[in-house]
Amino acid sequence: MALLGAEVVLWNRTAAHVAEIRERAGVELEGEAVGFAKLSLVTSDMAEALADAKLVMVCVPAFGHRDVARECAPHLRDGHVVVLNPGRTFGALEFIHELRAQECEADVVVAEAGTFIFASRSTGPAQSRIMRIKHAVPVAAIPDDRGVEVMELLGTWYHQFTLSESTLDTSFGNVGAVVHPVITLLNAARIENTQGRFDFYVDGVSIGVAHVLEAVDRERMAVAQLLGVQVRSLKDWLLSAYRAGGEDLYEAIMANEGYRGIQAPPTTQNRYMLEDIPMSMVPMASAGRGFGLTPRAIEAVIDLSGLMHLTNYWSRGRTLATLGLEGLSPAEIKRVATKGYDG
């Protein structure tokens, strides 16, 4: 956004993590966006970061959303627009739920994107490479009647964002919940033995891995349907976001030029698991269980990943209970995801 001419403040809770960016007063970009992005301020003080802000872009792993909401709560003002990039599953609901817990009374719009707009990697302490800018990224707001306001702000800088009816659309359109954990889990030995020295999406996907991806993807769509939401398949999403097509999912993944060159993580203890399992898969499974569906493929990935990491992802993840949605009907949950908790 700074490269495009926006006045941007960068906040990070740990000053040391952005020390070089502060010293250089910006970030060097390469790839599909090239140049030095000059920032107006780099800070670890949330009050300072939000003082003159209108659009608040939250670009952290989803397990940080609740903490960021807690940090923001005392400093948010009427008219602030918060966009989670992305929300993963139920991200906007969790953010609002925490603002309510912190007794934040500001008239704030909270929106979530269905995916991160960039396929990108940090290449240094003040350098980033954008391998691909996605062609279409859905975004939805709570309350939904403020969606146009969100789109006007985002549209100044990005034409790729498209407005969805409900955050259930963006939450269950979350294909990262499918691809990240499955490929990581099924390549665990390779990741651990090579420290991730292979192309994650190209070398890490075979026809058999694609079959597991398809099974998890079918369950994601089935849970969404229980809540009255129709979402596209992973194969169709690849065509929309990357213009990558094929006869089946395996061919579509192999045809995606945006995936080429993206290295696997050096360890399985990374956001592909630590974020996507508790903040994407667990809420999907929780919603499915709540309404009579047993998503066995999703549950298998959650359970096996928990065994591998010696942790209980079910207890760490977003669930209907932790979001204050337990006991609500699908129609009631859809209303909260559209109008808010007081809607």
Image (cartoon, grey):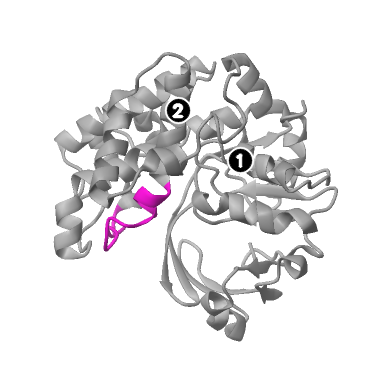
Residue 120: x and y in percent read 43, 59
**Which residue lies under the disc numbered 2?**
286
**Which residue lies under the disc numbered 1?**
94
Q: Quadrant of the C terminus?
A: top right
Residue 220: x and y in percent read 40, 26
Residue type pointed to by label 2: Ser
Secondary structure type for disc 2: helix
**Towards the viewer: 154 or 218:** 218
Query: What residue is drawn where x is 46% and y is 69%?
Result: 128
Quadrant in the rendering for residue 297: top left
Q: Earlier in the sequence, mark 2 or mark 1?
A: 1
Q: Is residue 262 magenta?
A: yes
Main secondary structure of the magenta stretch: loop
**Towards the viewer: 205 or 158:** 205
Residue type pointed to by label 1: Glu
Q: Which residues are magenta?
A: 260-275
In three-dimensional space, the C-alpha distance between marks 2 and 1, rounded to whole angstroms, equals 14 Å
